[in-house]
Structure formats: structure tokens, C-alpha cells
Image (cartoon, rainbow, N blue to C red):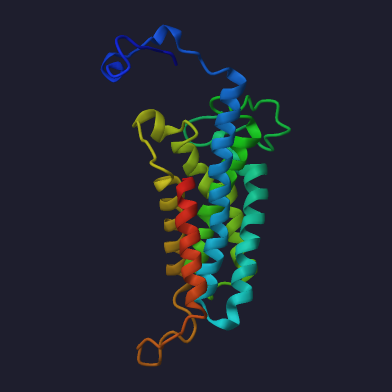
């Protein structure tokens, strides 16, 4: 951008004009680099949120379940990443119709995947969406903490990452029926990530019920002291930071 200044130095603030014709456009490779760096930084922040989820859950659960909670949080990221890459990404962003995509499975090896929106490389966009898919599944982890086995939760994570989250995501972000027919706009993942994760968590809580020993024979709640409030507080702060990546 160049500024044409008229008059004296003291009058520059009131007399400077922006010559739009002389603006220097951003070089396309540089634009792609800046877009990629911005999206990757956001993706790293969202990925770091899983450390916050793990600390919050382990801090509020009982001491005997800390190891299982931490293992569950690591496993959900691993399983969700694999399933979303091989199945979920194609259902979410592939071409096929208003309800789900039909191509783009294993996107790095699928020649039908043209690329990411804008000027980003495909792998940048893929990683950004992958951490969101894992986050939606991790939301459920906190709701069912101390009430579900590792095997059962990983089965749920597989279904959520490969089917439930991608299909809803296709309706909104993948050019599906909500985006095309109603003009629906999702704000910072409030629907695709948070509402979907919250709905799955609510369903899990209703089906599984309360933790064993939470109520006595007369239905009165029993106290279950948290393991570590400092860990929970640290996790909240990490989540607070990570949400800026949304």
C-alpha cells in the first residue's frame, strides 16, 4: 500500500490519500503460505485442547480411575484420526449429494480430491478437520467418565468419527442440504462440533446412567471427591487457550 501525502508534515494525517491503484497484491505463493500457517496454528491450538480435556477429566474423577481416563483421552485421538482419515473425510467433504459425500476416502491417495478451499494444501485442511473430529468425540469422554469401559468407548469413537460427525458436517461444511437449501451458517463449530458432541454425550449419559455407588438405597447422592482440583483448573486454562483456535 502506498500513501500519497499532501501539504506539510503536520497536515499529513488529514491530507493523506490511499492510492488503491498502486496497491501491491500479495504474491499467490505467499498468500498460500500465510493461509496455511494461520490454519495450522489454529489446528495446533485445538489439538492442544485434548491435554486440557485429559487434565479436567482426571482432576474431577476419583484417584482409582485416573489412569483409565488418561488412556481413554489418548486413545480417542488416535482412533478418531485414523477413522476420519479413511472414512469420515470422504463422507464429509466428498461429492455425492446433499446428505453425504461419496468420494475422497483416504484423501492423500484419492485423485478425485481436488484440494482444500482457498489456497491451502490438502494436508493442512485435512489436519485442521481431523482435530475437530477428535474434539467432538472427546466431548463425550468427559460425560461418560468412570462409567464406560475402554473397549466400549473406542467402539463408540469409531462410529462417531467415521459416520455421525462427518455426516452432520457434510450437511453444514461439506455443501450439504443445510448449507445449500437453508443458507445455514455454523459459527466456530458451535453446531458441527459442540452440538453434535453434546448430543452424543447426552445420549450416552441417558443410556449408561449414573456412576456405580453414586446414590444410596434411598436415592440420595453420595459424595465422590474429586482427585485433584489443581489438575482440573490447569485443564480449564488449557481449554480456554485452545478455544481461540476455533
* Between 153 and 243, the one nearer to me in the picture: 243
Estimate the x, y position of residue 90 in percent, counting from the top left.
61, 37
Number of numbered discs: 0
Which residue shows up at 40% across the image and 88% down it?
222
Q: Residue at x 51, y 53 (%)?
A: 136
Point out the residue furthest to the bottom here: 217
Quadrant that contains the N terminus? top left
Q: Is residue 104 visible?
A: no
Q: Is residue 244 above or below residue 27?
A: below
The extreme top residue here reads 21
Residue 203 on image: x %, y % = 44, 62
* Residue 180 horizontal side relative to residue 126, left or right: left
**Residue 71 located left or right of residue 96:** right
Q: Nearer the viewer, residue 191 or 199?
A: 191
Q: Is residue 134 visible?
A: yes
- Between 195 and 65, the residue placed more toward the observer is 65
Image quarter of residue 22: top left
Amino acid at each position: 500500500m502506498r500513501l500519497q501525502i499532501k501539504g506539510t508534515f503536520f497536515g499529513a494525517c488529514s491530507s493523506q490519500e490511499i492510492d488503491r491503484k498502486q496497491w501491491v497484491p500479495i504474491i499467490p505463493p505467499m498468500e498460500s503460505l500465510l493461509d496455511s500457517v494461520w490454519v495450522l496454528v489454529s489446528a495446533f491450538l485445538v489439538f492442544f485442547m485434548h491435554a486440557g480435556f485429559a487434565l479436567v477429566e482426571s482432576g474431577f474423577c476419583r484417584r482409582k480411575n485416573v489412569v483409565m481416563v488418561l488412556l481413554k483421552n489418548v486413545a480417542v485421538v488416535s482412533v478418531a484420526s485414523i477413522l476420519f482419515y479413511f472414512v469420515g473425510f470422504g463422507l464429509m467433504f466428498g461429492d455425492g449429494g446433499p446428505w453425504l459425500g461419496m468420494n475422497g476416502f483416504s484423501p492423500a491417495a484419492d485423485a478425485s480430491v481436488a484440494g482444500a478451499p482457498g489456497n491451502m494444501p490438502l494436508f493442512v485442511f485435512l489436519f485442521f478437520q481431523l482435530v475437530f473430529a477428535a474434539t467432538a468425540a472427546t466431548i463425550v469422554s468427559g460425560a461418560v467418565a468412570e462409567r464406560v469401559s475402554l473397549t466400549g468407548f473406542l467402539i463408540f469413537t469409531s462410529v462417531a468419527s467415521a459416520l455421525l460427525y462427518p455426516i452432520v458436517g457434510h450437511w453444514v461444511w461439506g455443501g450439504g442440504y443445510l448449507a445449500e437449501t437453508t443458507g445455514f451458517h455454523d459459527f466456530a463449530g458451535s453446531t458441527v462440533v459442540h452440538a453434535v458432541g453434546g448430543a452424543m454425550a447426552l445420549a450416552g449419559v441417558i443410556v449408561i446412567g449414573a456412576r456405580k455407588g453414586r446414590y444410596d438405597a434411598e436415592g440420595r447422592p453420595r459424595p465422590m471427591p474429586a482427585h485433584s482440583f489443581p489438575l482440573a483448573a490447569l485443564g480449564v486454562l488449557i481449554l480456554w487457550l485452545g478455544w481461540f483456535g476455533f
